[in-house]
Image (tube, helix red, strand yellow):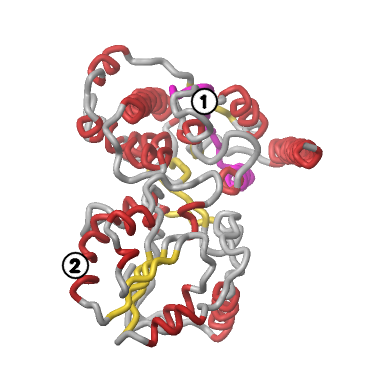
Amino acid sequence: MLKKLLRKIKQISIRFRLFRRVHRTNRKIMAHSRADAEKSPVIFFNASTRLRGLSQNAAFSLITSWAVQLAGVPVVRFACRAGMSHCVLGTVLGDPDDPPPCRGCVADTRRFTGSASTAWFDYHENQELKSKLDGLSVSELKVFHYQDRPLGPLTVPSLRWALRRHDLQDNQITRYLLSSYILSAHNIAEKFRQVLQREQPQSVIVFNGLQYPEATVRWVAQQHETRVITYEVGLRPYSGFFTDGDATAYPIHIPDAFQLSEQQNERLDAYLENRFEGDFTMAGIHFWPDMRSLDDEIIKKIEEYKQVIPIFTNVVFDTSQAFANTIFSSMFDWLDTLLGIIKDHPDNLFVIRAHPDELREGKESKQTVEAWVKSNRLDERDNVIFIGPNQLFSSYELIRRSKFVMV
């Protein structure tokens, strides 16, 4: 009880210092930025990066907007003021049908947007749209269009993320949430269309581009032929990746003739050396508290077979999966295809390695690779080893012993 109280006091202290620092910086930005009236503004929008406080992705948006202001370009922040029936982050807090915690979130948004003009949007439910959604199945909702807006496709990635599964069940809560997301997406589209027409921005910068609030804003801007930049965390710690394309696909063009310099090679070697030891973070998350060598039992089993083939899986609800499912409809569709290969090659050892993020505390997947392994009785096959997300074996050591790798 005392530890919990001390942790709470520490969190409040950190938040207070953060707010004070942001307030001071906002005042300095206002004092030192001179917007050029001849320049069109840049609109910033992120409603899926935080509820309270400041996440790493929310910080990227804030710092970038400050830099744009200091460059003399007007900034407008499109901001949610209880503008959604259900937001993405609010869905995963407790019961999915609970209303989002708007009061604290809006209060923090006010603190973070103090240096620039803010276009707030509220929620107004479209009754005509609501009546059209009533009674539709999940399959119908997933492809639903209204007023030429692809509201179903825009919202499905967010629902997968919120429910922590790829295959959406046709039940009451899934239908309710998907309908709520569609209604909220339509509201955002209407409100952002008005802001676009009023501001005539040169560009729009949004987080991710796949969570439904940002995906909707992106779609509306593109319909008006306005440049849209999306961003995500980069591979290196505390780095951001900004692109005119899809941020979670990390589209990087590397010319055929490109060669690393000696200094770049040294940087890459140092990065890989740390990564091989599990000493790295993504979005501030340290996935590997420890990384262990393959134990003697696994090594002995590897030596009994003709060759070893690892199968590395991913987190099926992650927004990046929208770009992974091209040949197969989903990761589990791909795994189902591999079943026959595993059975037809009993002299090969297949090591199925679940992603360490699959059971991260507070983000546990509801559709797991372990459940798939058991349902197909692969845990009973001699030529299959399943390594769960909490088993801290070195994937790199496994790769070095492999004939080839499947991902």
Q: Is residue 393 above or below residue 202?
A: below
Are the two marked residues, 2 and 1, in contact with CB atoms closer than 8 angstroms?
Answer: no
Q: Position of residue 329 (x, y in %)?
A: 23, 52
Q: How far apart are labels 2 and 1 at the CA level?
A: 45 Å
Q: Residue furthest front?
A: 380
Looking at the rendered image, the quarter that the N terminus falls into is top right
Residue found at x 56% / y 37% = 74
Q: Callout 2, which amino acid? A: Gly
Mark 1 — residue?
100
Q: Earlier in the sequence, mark 2 or mark 1?
A: 1
Residue found at x 41% / y 28% = 192
Q: Callout 1, which amino acid? A: Pro
Looking at the rendered image, the quarter that the C terminus falls into is bottom left
In the figure, is residue 25 to the left or right of 268? right
Q: Is residue 198 visible?
A: no
Mark 2 — residue?
340
Q: Position of residue 253 (x, y in %)?
A: 37, 67
For the residue pair 115 and 8, the one nearer the viewer reads as 8
Marks 2, 1: nearer the viewer: 2
Q: Is residue 140 above or below residue 242?
A: above
| Residue 43 highlighted magenta (yes or no) | no
Q: Position of residue 159 (x, y in %)?
A: 37, 37
Determine whether the residue tagged by mark 1 lies in a helix, strand or loop.
Answer: loop
For the residue pair 394 and 215, the one nearer the viewer reads as 394
For the residue pair 189 and 47, the one nearer the viewer reads as 47
Q: Position of residue 2 (x, y in %)?
A: 81, 38
Q: Residues within 10 Å of mark 1 (few under 14, many from 20)?
A: many
Q: Residues within 10 Å of mark 2 (few under 14, many from 20)?
A: few
Give the residues drawn in magenta, as a range. 62-85
| Residue 64 highlighted magenta (yes or no) | yes
